[in-house]
Image: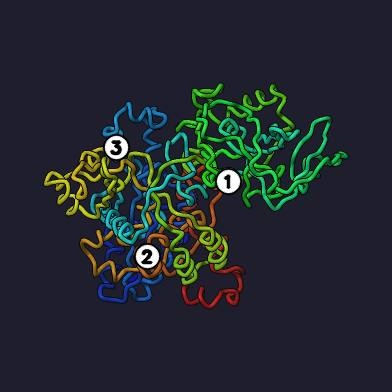
Amino acid sequence: MYKKVETSLNFVEREKEISEFWKANQVFEKTISLREGAPAYTFFDGPPTANGKPHMGHILTRAMKDIIPRYRTMKGFNVLRKAGWDTHGLPVELEVERELGLDGKPQIEKYGVEPFIKKCKESVWKYKGVWETMSDDVAFWADMDNPYITYEDNYIESVWWALKTIADKGLLYKGYKIVPYCPRCGTALSSHETAQGYKNVKETSIFVTFPIKNFDCSALVWTTTPWTLPSNVGLCVNSKYEYVKVLHNGEKLLLAKGLMEKVFGDESIEILQSYTGEELVGLEYEPLFKLVDFLPEIKPYRIVEDDYVTLSDGSGIVHIAPAFGEDDARVGKNYDLPFIQLVNERGHLTDATPWAGMFVKDADKQIISDIKAQGRLFKKAEFEHDYPFCWRCDTPLLYYARESWFIKMTQLKDKLLSFNKSINWIPENIRDGRMGNFLENIIDWGISRERYWGTPLPVWVCEKCGEIEVVGSRAQLIQRGGKECESIELHKPYIDEVTFGCLKCGCTMKREPSVIDCWFDSGSMPFAQWHYPFENKDEFEKRYPADYISEAVDQTRGWFYTLIAISACLFDQPAFRNCLVLGHVQDKNGIKMSKHKGNVIDPADALQRQGADAVRWYYYINSNPWLPNRYSHEAVSEAQRKFI
């Protein structure tokens, strides 16, 4: 009845035989059809991008994604296992830029947006076959014949519906804010994207002096970003602190008394006079660089006050450049300080400065040298701190004033926290730790990207009166833009050609040229994969929320967050009930393996040498995520036991 099991086996070849048997007999498909009508159990597959090769870390996620749906199927459930592909955004654009030898937006514009978009669409599927082969090799069972694809028009239409709904709730707005900005990619990033790119770096910090008019001393100011000093228009103190005028090597300096020891060390310093911070407000000073001519009624170079100034570092006096910091912008607005931005969109100093064309980080050394030549450099020191880099191209981010579109996530903070508490996180510390801390400090979601390959922002604005209209479906687009919109592709540059009359004043309305944060695409997959609400309404409602999702810990502020954020905007429950959070597979230097860092190992090598079962088993037992002590069943919480 049964074949005799051979005692000497080539495990890799045996796995291939089993895989071929499964395919030939449609075993996976039968596990689905045999459960038709059974209770539903839903798994959401976080969509990978197929224009980059998978690495060893993806075997871990594939293995852990597969084990629970497979088990639930065996327990009699009808398990949804629909695969998906994340196809928009910077990951694709940067790959195409490399292929074409382009560097940044000016060169893309010169090459042509339409041919660039076509190249992006081709690039999306560059390694699709490699992903499918790896998935087969590790026995990851998912419906890859009918996946959801984020660039398809039906998917985009569902995303448009979501944004229209968000706008109708009063949660979508346009604002001119300080945002994390990548000068190489030429676009703002969201807070959760920024959170993924921090590095510990050493930079040169400096103390500089600003002579105070009619006060017989100079304000001592510390900064870690010398490149912002040319745009300085104010100095900020804290009204609650005590400030002192001291004599140091024949020079009279003003600083917070509480920071004297940090600034001067063991030196014996004579205090000449004391002041409250409030007494200093309104005093005028001499700037380091006079690069802009102001109108007589504009009053720059004044001392102002704000509670954000602390005694943790520096001198207790902070320089204000409203174009390059959220607190700077707020304080500058409160005191009517002028706004000057002497750095262009590429992160280069402008022609109005002596350092024209230099990237800001490269200009630091020259700016420091010029300050020293003026006799205004008190001292400099190496400073170690965490600094954000672009999560895709690794360029240092700038906090830069940009006009962007935002979703009012701060208005939904209580709902977000409630959703987070209701989710069964494994391990449990994610709930109150990494995710909980992030949500406690939530800021509005900047969703617009000044790029090309992405879901177009469905917002049209009147050229004359500024009236805003958000389009939420193709039917609405046809109604407003005409019959030619019936077949138009919902991408740039095609959609940019659609204009229509303003219902308020009759003038022309044009689409805002931005695309949407690609994380909004992936976070919309629970409903967009069904083209909801335009069809499959019953199927979506039966399959929402997901019973199980799993990805690595970096997705806490990535896909996990966007799922929760969008569900808070649209629905009354979170998008998933149980989430298994995995660690990272690291390289030999202890750094997370990542395609854009180039430190990945080809999983095909391990699978060919050891076989999928050996690799999967290694991941299962090496750091079992649901057993803090993997040898003690008692260590499993009741919630985790119920989930398993």
Q: Are marks 1 and 3 in contact (CB under 8 Å)?
A: no
Q: Position of 254 compared to 23: left or right?
A: right
| Count of numbered circles in the view | 3
Q: Amino acid at mark 3?
A: Ile
Q: Mark 3 = which residue?
A: 117
- Mark 3 vs mark 2, foreground winner is 3
Badge 1 crowding class, 10 Å Cα cut-off, few under 14, some 14 to 19, many 20 or more, is few
Residue 591 tag number: 1
Residue 638 position, x and y percent, is 53, 78
Badge 2 crowding class, 10 Å Cα cut-off, few under 14, some 14 to 19, many 20 or more, is many
Residue 405 appears in the rendering: yes
Marked residue nearer the N-terminal end (1 or 3)? 3
**Quarter where residue 217 is shown:** top right
Q: Amino acid at mark 1?
A: Ile
Q: Is label 2 in a helix, a strand or a loop?
A: strand
Marked residue nearer the N-terminal end (2 or 1)? 2
Badge 3 crowding class, 10 Å Cα cut-off, few under 14, some 14 to 19, many 20 or more, is many
Residue found at x 54% / y 51%:
585
Q: Is label 3 in a helix, a strand or a loop?
A: helix
Q: Mark 2 = which residue?
A: 43
Identify whether 562 is placed above or below 130: below
Residue 193 position, x and y percent, is 47, 48
Identify whether 394 is placed above or below 419: above
